[in-house]
Image (cartoon, helix red, strand yellow):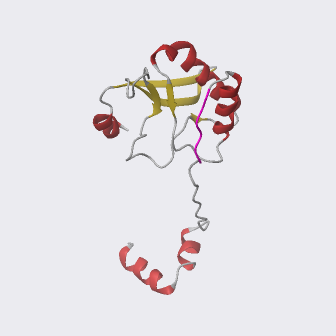
Amino acid sequence: MRTWWKYFGRDRSLAILLAREDGRLHGIAPLFLAARALPFVRGGVGFLGATDVCSEYLGLIIRRGYEERIVPAFMQFLFDHWGDSWDVLRWTAILANSPQITLIDEFIERRHLSAVKRDGVMNHLVQLASTWDACCAALPSKHRGKLRRITP
């Protein structure tokens, strides 16, 4: 993120939120606040890494099982503490099956806000063998031979 921030952080402010309970970290919102980008818009909130050359998957980083408490808390904080500095919440590249999407939608609906939602990110899954030997055994013999030549 340091390199991304160096080149894309101009005219933006870091806005990293942490969610802790009993001294334990349960969530991180790696965000930035952007200055006015469009007429009639005060500014926007986005994920660090969110540009044309961004990370494949973005989103809130939350310990499993804490999403229902932390997502609404992060959203409430954005409105209560920084709401005067932004109009657009542009959160892109959240996994399509992430529980965060549902929780964000519920928050938006409860607040009677308007939102534009686009299809989420397609997930790719590659099932790997449980051991290195099993992984090599699953390869065609031509690839196993190449692998033997390049690995010590």
- Residue 118 percent location from the top left of the image: 58, 44
Q: In this view, does 24 lie above or below 100?
A: above
Q: Give whichever of 20, 60 is nearer the camera.
A: 60
Q: Give whichever of 12, 112 is nearer the camera.
A: 112
Check the image and name the residue furthest to the bottom. Answer: 141
- Residue 61 percent location from the top left of the image: 56, 36
Residue at x 56%, y 43% (from the top left corner):
94
* Quadrant assignment for the N terminus: top left
Q: Residue 118 lies in magenta, yes or no?
A: yes
Residue at x 58%, y 36% (from the top left corner):
116
* Location of residue 104 (image quadrant): top right
Residue at x 34%, y 39% (from the top left corner):
4
- Residue 21 percent location from the top left of the image: 63, 21
Q: Is residue 58 above or below residue 11?
A: below
Q: Is residue 21 above or below residue 67?
A: above
Q: Main secondary structure of the magenta part?
A: loop
Say if residue 61 shows up in the picture: yes
* Location of residue 128 (image quadrant): bottom right
Q: Residue 79 lies in magenta, yes or no?
A: no
Q: Give whichever of 64, 85 is nearer the camera.
A: 85
Q: Is residue 144 left or right of residue 100?
A: left
Q: Magenta residues, as a range?
A: 114-119
Say if residue 64 shows up in the picture: no
- Residue 76 percent location from the top left of the image: 61, 19
Q: Give whichever of 9, 40 is nearer the camera.
A: 40
Residue at x 65%, y 27% (from the top left corner):
108
Q: How many marks?
A: 0
* Quadrant assignment for the C terminus: bottom left
* Location of residue 115 (image quadrant): top right
